Image: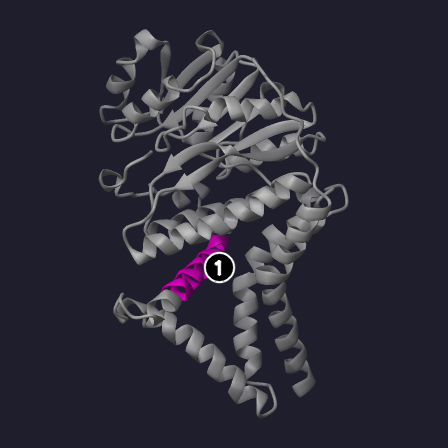
Amino acid sequence: MSNFWIVLFVFSACLIVYTLFGYPLLLALLARFAEKPVRKGPVTKTVSVLIPIRNGEQFVKSKLESVLRVKYPRNLLEILVISDGSEDRTDELVQEFAAHGVQLVRLPRAGKAAALNAGRSRAHGEIILFTDVRQPLHPESLGRLMSCFADPTVGVVSGELRIMKGETREEADVGLYWRYETWIRDRLSRIDSMFGATGPFYAMRRELTVPIPPDILLDDVYLPINAFFRGYRLVVEPTAIAFDYPTSLQSEFLRKVRTLAGNYQIIRCRPELLGPSNRMWLHFISYKVARLLLPYAFLILALSTFGLPQPWRDAALAGQSFFYAIAALDVWIPKEWTLKRVSSIVRTFIVLMAAAACAVSVFFVSPRTLWRETRVRAEKSHFP
């Protein structure tokens, strides 16, 4: 019986180590020695900018001003703001930009997918730029994004979302996590493709877009994955920058529940992601599926520890107890203590693991209940 617990312990430990450290190392090596550069060049295709929005009066003015400042031929740009039943001053503020060619499409509230479908049906551009209301764009961002479409193998191009520096340790750790995610996506892009796009800012060839099912949580995965299975690459252009505000751990937890629940949806919609018809199936399993399994690996690791022989049992129990204890005590550890740098990161990691565990709720509740507004302290953040 002890051998059974040892096998469980070793298996779960190996899964954890591979997911967190082994796979990123493999990815770094592949990106270095098996890179597929994107052939960039001047592109002057027509672009339709779609901005879905609900009750975004806090951000819409700065967003539209940033879009109008982008260095791209104005006669090639179509800007559509799709208001999903907004009840604040959003529509009124958008209409102030009508003289600049900004079009307001007002819809009864039906969700982001319906808003994007409505915008897509009205768009005339050869390229559709999907962008959210909260993130202002760098003036050079669109041109740099478009240069990647000179490569005929590229179907989707994501910009880089640059998170402003947080004022609290919690916000800084969430930002650190996002930089880790950005690093992973960049390396996937170098060897072939990301598994989706950076939702707040990405562009796609219009002929590759498809209608989005109403309950899909990740439009920025559902749409690009369809292009991926048609043989196109999904890449990131790090110099095409959109800015975003730092978020709290609570907001990140809710966002992570939604995004990981959305991964379950995508697997159900496109089960071929798990098989050999996916040219990057190993990366999908190592990156997306392993992330979903990670909280259960930690649970199995903890349970199997009690079946280990001595002295391994006590050593493993002591290590795990310390790991979880410093996370639990983090809120009481003074910020000037050196230990805080470790405890805050561990706490952030465990909260995100809890979000991964909660993502299975998508099988038991309506997906729309997992949408939550991301709250930010915008008034305290400034963009370059």
Q: Is residue 195 magenta?
A: no
| Position of residue 7 measured from the top left corner of the image (x, y, whole percent) | 68, 78
The secondary structure that dominates the magenta segment is helix
Q: Residue at x 40, y 26 (%)?
A: 52
Q: Secondary structure at mark 1?
A: helix
Total numbered labels placed on residues in the image? 1
Residue 211 occupies quadrant: top right
Its colouring scheme is one colour
Q: Is residue 338 above or below residue 47?
A: below
- Tell me where the magenta segment starts and ends, as one range: 344-360
Q: Residue at x 45, y 48 (%)?
A: 178
Check disc 1 and give the amino acid type: Ala
- Tag 1 residue: 357
86 relative to 370 in the view: left or right: left
Q: Residue at x 67, y 24 (%)?
A: 151
Image quarter where the N terminus lies is bottom right
Q: Name the residue at the right extreme.
A: 276
